[in-house]
Image (cartoon, rainbow, N blue to C red):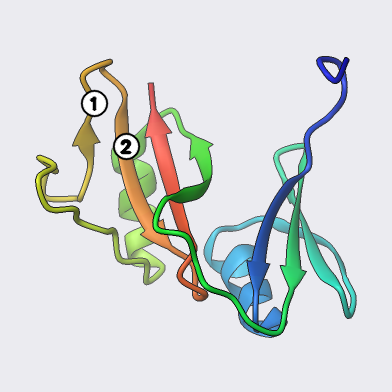
Amino acid sequence: MLGKSHVVAFVATTDGNRARFFYGETLGLTVVSDDAFALICDANGTPLRIQKVESLRPHEFTVLGWEVSDIEATVDGLTKRGLRFERFEGMRQDARGIWSAPSGARVAWFKDPDGNTLSLTES
């Protein structure tokens, strides 16, 4: 039924100004709108609605991710913009923090200012 409908992605923030800088400047997404309820960014044609909330307890798992064609270059570029990539015990990650999955995909994780876990994947 929804197979031909467009997806809207959601994430939450307790600080709209901080989120606007992170998603707009650090990650390079275009800010489409910003009001009292949400900041909306264009994530390559997918609306990303960053809900403004009073309190937030981030999940321990990935809530949002991007497929990239060159994960090493993307990690390097984001590191230069101040991002720190996460390391997880028991996972063999390279010097950049990139994990090679059994499927052959390569994944790296980072957090937004609210502690939401985000990822990059190169298949």
Residue that appears at 32% across and 62% down: 79
Evaluate if marks 1 and 2 touch, with contact meaning CB atoms under 8 Å apart.
yes
Q: Which residue is mark 1?
A: 101
Position above or below: 34 against 104: below
Q: Quadrant of residue 78 in the image?
A: bottom left
Position above or below: 90 against 78: above
Q: What amino acid is at disc 1?
A: Ala
Exactly how many numbered labels are in the figure? 2
Q: Quadrant of residue 51 in the image?
A: bottom right
Element at label 1:
loop
The local crowd at label 2, few if under 14, some if 14 to 19, many if 20 or more residues have their Cα within 10 Å, is: many
Residue that appears at 81% across and 15% down: 3
Q: What amino acid is at disc 2?
A: Val
Q: Judge from the rendering whether residue 110 lies leftward or rightward of residue 3; answer left or right.
A: left
Mark closest to the chain's N terminus, 1 or 2: 1
Which mark, residue 107? 2
Position above or below: 46 against 4: below
Residue 119 lies, in percent from the top left, at: 43, 46
Q: CA distance from mark 1 to mark 2?
A: 7 Å
Residue 40 lies, in percent from the top left, at: 80, 60
Residue 61 lies, in percent from the top left, at: 41, 51
